[in-house]
Image (spheres, rainbow, N blue to C red):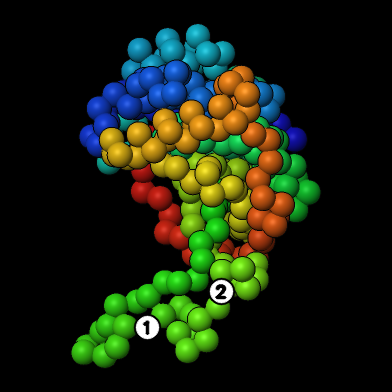
Amino acid sequence: MSILCVIPVRGGSKGVPGKNARVVAGKPLVVWSIEQALAASLDVLVSTDDPELAAIARAAGADVPFLRPAELAQDTTPTEPVILHAIRHRTAEGRRPDAVMLLQATSPVRLPGTLARAVREFTQTGVDSLVGVVPQTPFFWHPAADGGSATAEYDPAARPLRQELRADDYFYKETGSLYLSRTELYEREDNRIGGRVGLFVMDEAEGVDIDTLVDLRIAEQVLGDLGAAAGGSGETPGSARDGRRDVVSHAGSGVSRGAQTGERS
């Protein structure tokens, strides 16, 4: 199966100006995702409108075959048309991929082996789209409506201990970090998620998403800590918790309980 890995990055950023080129834990932010994808032997294409980011990406080993058109680099541009633009470029080269892995550069924390595991689970389960998620305990509440009482997603009269929770008691929140989809989903539905959906359960540490300066500091701390734990090699430790490494598949068009991220790339 041929897989195209697309990393979309814009030069403009509202929350953290210039964040995709900003040095985080010793590397420009976008380089973390590029190196992780190259380590998984993926065909890595960076889609950007910014010459500086293009130069950074090429130096890191990514293919940057074009500068993204201005109409696909607006604050209101969704991610899907950007990915479809990259697919069409590869197709015009005679290299239409069977599937596309979307990596968000703003989620730089991925453990070694994570991307290879995603590819393996995608092919083995036969799902149409795989969504990166992190587990969440079920201790969620809905606000009161019309003067009634707030309601919980669990039974407060029999509140379980965390260690008593079973796998099916958890909710799963999209990280925004990783999506792996059959190419025809983009071509036919203009969506990264569709058909038979699988949940790719990632380690809690991989759930960092940079949207603010606080997020940036958290990512830098996590990457630094993981690098130190790996003996200063710059690589993060290689295994997530075994009990959370399985794909949770859902038939039809179901999506994980976490809201789909609304990032602009």
Mark earlier in primary sequence (1, 2) = 1
Q: Looking at this view, is 124 or 157 the one in front?
A: 157
Residue 91 visible in rendering: no
Residue drawn where x is 44% and y is 23% of the image: 25
Q: Is residue 171 left or right of residue 42?
A: left
Q: CA distance from mark 1 to mark 2?
A: 19 Å
- x 49%, y 46%: residue: 207
For the residue pair 181 and 173, the one nearer the viewer reads as 173
Which label was assigned to residue 151?
A: 1
Note whether 204 is above or below 38 in the view shown.
below
- Nearer the observer, 168 or 42: 168
**Residues packed near mark 1 inside 10 Å, few (<14), some (14 to 19) or many (20 plus):** some
Give the residue pinned by disc 2: 161
Image quadrant occupied by the N terminus:
top right
User: How many numbered circles are shown?
Assistant: 2
**Dot 1 amino acid type:** Thr
Task: Name the mark nearer the viewer: 1 or 2.
Answer: 2
